[in-house]
């Protein structure tokens, strides 16, 4: 934080208030960022950014976290995060996919992953997970997926279509029952993005992207952690409650299905630093536990 004071000569004096201690940026060359284009189910090339410590051996042993959102034309980057350094410093790989539904290649790329074309989003995401395994970064047992809000469609459908590809998944404040989501108070504003059950084509598209309705008994699903704030006004908490109950009843893998509820939280926007730290700690501990057998 900086202190700004006008001087007698009309100039402005800017000084460090010393209210915050300076951070320590990683040394140059400590991390490697690689950007690739991954062929999807129909040949479309999906952008994937991969971050890891320099010198990583591609022997399939690295715990790898694959993040995606792919809605509303929003494009994700492997942005700097101090908490993410903890994952990288423990030898983890962090990857960011931009499937169709994102804005990675403009309006056509976005429209190719919304409403009736939404299956392209999770199929693209699956293709990037397969790439990470094929290139020796990780194995399915050590590959985790993470998405939140509308990214719940992406990750939820990826693990229900390809449960064998992922060892674990985290879905934060996820949109998971798309057939009923329109009936929420915040449902109508999302009709342009996902469609409406009021038409046959709309209903079929929503059913296809509804992770809850694609869970089947006796399938070996990955370990899943669902996080949600009780006061969420964007995606109501019952969606995570239903998904957690359905997965626990259906899965044959013996892996945990956990529900983390914050009774003072909402959709995550406006969460305090303490709330954010508590949740990210639980998320990374869960993912390392599943990938390596240890939460440390």
Image (cartoon, rainbow, N blue to C red):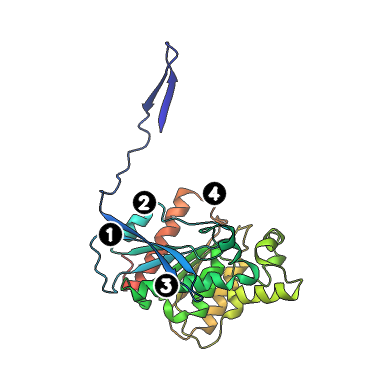
Q: Which residue is mark 4?
A: 270
Query: Residue 254: horizontal and vertical position, in percent?
Result: 43, 83
Q: Which residue is mark 1?
A: 53
Mark 1 or 4, closer to the camera: 1
User: Which badge, 4 or 3, comes first in the chain's sequence?
Assistant: 3
Q: Report how far apart the C-alphas of labels 2 and 1 lie in the structure.
A: 14 Å
Residue at coordinates 71% horizontally, 75% vertically from top-left? 201
Q: Could you tell me if the residues under marks 4 and 3 are in contact, i.e. CB atoms within 8 Å?
A: no
Q: Is residue 73 above or below residue 6?
A: below
Q: Report how far apart the C-alphas of labels 3 and 1 lie in the structure.
A: 19 Å
- Is disc 2 placed on a helix, strand or loop? helix
Quarter-wise, where is residue 13 in the image? top left
Query: Residue 164: horizontal and vertical position, in percent?
Result: 43, 81
Q: Residues within 10 Å of mark 1 (few under 14, many from 20)?
A: some
Q: Report how far apart the C-alphas of labels 4 and 3 lie in the structure.
A: 31 Å
- Is disc 4 placed on a helix, strand or loop? loop
Mark 4 or 3, closer to the camera: 3
Q: Is residue 144 above or below residue 217?
A: above
Q: Which residue is mark 2?
A: 82
Q: Is residue 207 above or below residue 262?
A: below
């Amino acid at each position: 934080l900086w202190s700004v004071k006008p001087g007698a000569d009309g100039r402005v004096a800017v000084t460090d208030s010393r209210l915050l201690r300076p951070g320590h940026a990683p040394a140059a060359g400590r991390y490697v960022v690689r950007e690739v284009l991954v062929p999807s189910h129909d040949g479309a090339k999906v952008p994937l950014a991969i971050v890891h410590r320099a010198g990583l051996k591609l022997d399939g042993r690295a715990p790898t976290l694959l993040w995606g959102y792919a809605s509303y034309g929003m494009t994700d980057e492997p942005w700097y995060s101090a908490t993410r350094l903890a994952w990288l410093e423990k030898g983890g790989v962090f990857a960011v996919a931009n499937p169709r539904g994102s804005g990675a290649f403009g309006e056509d790329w976005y429209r190719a992953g919304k409403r009736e074309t939404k299956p392209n989003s999770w199929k693209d995401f699956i293709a990037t997970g397969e790439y990470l395994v094929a290139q020796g970064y990780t194995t399915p047992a050590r590959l985790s997926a993470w998405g939140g809000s509308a990214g719940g469609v992406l990750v939820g459908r990826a693990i229900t279509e390809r449960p064998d590809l992922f060892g674990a998944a985290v879905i934060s404040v996820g949109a998971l029952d798309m057939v009923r989501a329109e009936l929420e108070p915040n449902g109508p504003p999302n009709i342009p993005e996902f469609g409406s059950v009021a038409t046959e084509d709309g209903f079929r598209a929503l059913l296809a992207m509804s992770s809850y309705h694609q869970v089947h008994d006796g399938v070996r699903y990955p370990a899943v952690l669902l996080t949600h704030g009780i006061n969420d006004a964007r995606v109501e908490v019952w969606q995570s409650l239903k998904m957690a109950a359905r997965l626990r009843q259906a899965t044959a893998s013996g892996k945990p299905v956990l529900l983390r509820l914050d009774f003072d939280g909402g959709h995550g926007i406006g969460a305090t630093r303490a709330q954010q730290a508590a949740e990210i700690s639980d998320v990374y501990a869960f993912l390392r536990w599943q990938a390596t057998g240890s939460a440390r």
